[in-house]
Image: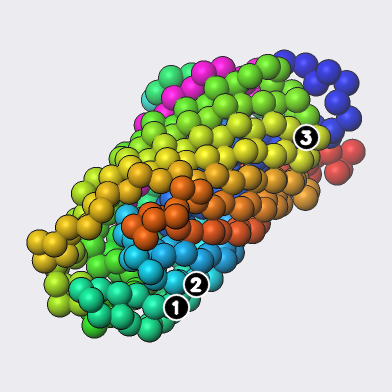
Amino acid sequence: MENNGSSIKPGAWLWLIVATMLATGTLCPPQALAQLPARFYWKSLSNANAVPVIVESLSGNTNPFDSAHTVTPGASLDATLALAGYAHTFSLLDRAAMAAIIVPMGHVSGDVTVSGRTFNQSASGFGDPMLEFDINVLGPPAQKNIPDVIRYEPGFSVDLLADVAVPIGKYDSGQPLNIGQHRWYGRFGLPIVWQLGPWVPGQRTTLEFLPAVWLFGDNDNYVGQRLETDPLFQLDMHLTRDLTEHLWGSIDAAWYNGGKATINGVSGESLNNLGVGFTLGYQVNDNLNLSLGYKTTINDSEPGDLRMDMFMVTLVYGWHPLVEGMRRLQDEK
């Protein structure tokens, strides 16, 4: 692929590919509307690393730390979340792969009703760490060197994805509102990236999908009761476009279906809700990326509907030993 007269420096051009996949709101955890940002599953040079810092402000009728989005009719909750993590890309059987961990922390408060009782509660602390593994199964082979990066175009790519949350977050069995969820949960998904048009910085356009199924263990001490949750199907969709070589935007949508909660044999309602939003991402320099996003549910007028609004700011610092070495050689010339 040629640069088509682009003025971007070689090192920065490489990082526009390497860091964008890891940084466009990246490692946004499954909490908070469980909608990962656009361009999260773009592939980069193997052995790249990234450390994200994410801050989110949310309000709605469900605990944003709960990936099941269990709706409490009439609830009014507000939360501030901070998230930190680490991601590493590598090659496995000549396919691009990624392993990541994210640790949520923060504060949530509001009115919650359980079994006819209303609680005005708050919780603060660390949530359940989330581990993720992703591997490409359809598309170009892993990018192992600079020539691979230069030749790379995603075309139509499909991944296999697995997440699991480790239930070690802060939990108080005496109240329904918690940071930790006191149960194992995770998901399986098929991230899809469909390239539309040329793969040149400043001109890239993609259509992206992530169909996934969330599975939940039982919480046997939910305010002294047993909480069970049916599988939740989720479909994330993004239409993304480069606005300049360093700036991109996306229109985002999500559909949630299922996830019915049962407390001591009393069942609630299944979700069937839509969410929409947008994301803007900007490459500050070769290593640092910034993104801003907003997401909201739309068909949320009934008491049992999922209702949530979220603002998100993400900073991600990324690096790769090979690219850092190239930069040092350029500085010495």
Q: Secondary structure at mark 2?
A: strand
For the residues labelled 1 and 2, the Cα–Cα distance comes to 6 Å
Give the residue displayed 44% in from the left and 72% down from the top. 76
Q: Pinpoint residue 51: horizontal percent, then vertical percent.
A: 57, 55
Circle 3: residue type: Leu
Answer yes or no: is residue 190 visible: yes
> Looking at the image, what colour scheme do you see?
rainbow
Name the residue beneath numbered marker 2: 78
Magenta residue span: 148-165
Q: Pinpoint residue 202: horizontal percent, then vertical percent.
A: 78, 29
Name the residue beneath numbered marker 1: 109
Circle 1: residue type: Ser
Q: Secondary structure at mark 1?
A: strand
What is the crowding at mark 2: few (fewer than 14 residues within 10 Å), some, or many (at least 20)?
many
Q: Pinpoint residue 47: horizontal percent, then vertical percent.
A: 54, 39
Q: Is residue 124 above or below residue 34?
A: below
For the residues labelled 3 and 1, the Cα–Cα distance comes to 38 Å
Q: Secondary structure at mark 3?
A: loop
Q: Earlier in the sequence, mark 3 or mark 2?
A: 2
Name the residue beneath numbered marker 3: 243
